Amino acid sequence: MQMRIIAALLALSLLACPLWASGFNVTGKWVSTAMGAKLKVNVEQHGNKISGVAFVYPLVGKKLTYHFSGIVKGTDVFASHHQGHSFSGRLTSRGLLEGVVHTRQGHQIAISAHRR
């Protein structure tokens, strides 16, 4: 379960990238939920590169923290966490960041985030 939460955080973080590609600055706070956990992601953008930190608040247990980095190509976003998880997604016309987190164990977690 912890790996899925990590993947969800990474996905949310990566999803923030497409907004910049559409002329928006994705620096800021993004929120979502995945598998019952609340996700809060802080993103900083510099050119086409992003970095940030994702916080996962599981229903049971303490807060988990994950740092990530990635790039934006058009509306496509790619990001990764040093433990081997990755995210690929894009900005939708509705302003949502949507994509899939791929864990190093092969799990896939769909993410849809909005800006706070």
Image (tube, rainbow, N blue to C red):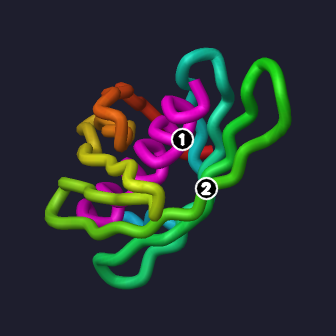
From the image, give the main secondary structure of the stretch colored magenta: helix
Q: Residue furthest left?
A: 74
- Lower sequence index among marks 2 and 1: 1
Start-end of magenta stretch: 1-23
Location of residue 98 in the rendering, given as x and y in whole percent from the top left corner: 33, 36
Residue 77, image quadrant: bottom left
Location of residue 99 in the rendering, given as x and y in whole percent from the top left corner: 30, 37
**Do the residues bearing badges 2 and 1 touch, measured as CB atoms within 8 Å?**
yes
In-image side of 58 versus 97 (left or right) = right
Q: Residue furthest bottom?
A: 47
Quadrant of the rendering where the N terminus is positioned: top right
Residue 100, image quadrant: top left
Instruction: Quickly name the residue at label 2.
Output: 66
Per the image, is 29 magenta? no
Q: Which element type, helix, strand or loop, lies under badge 1?
A: helix
Q: Residue at x 38, y 37 (%)?
A: 96
Q: Residue at x 29, y 69 (%)?
A: 71
Quadrant of the rendering where the C terminus is positioned: top right
Instruction: Quickly name the residue at label 1.
Output: 6
Q: Residue at x 73, y 27 (%)?
A: 58
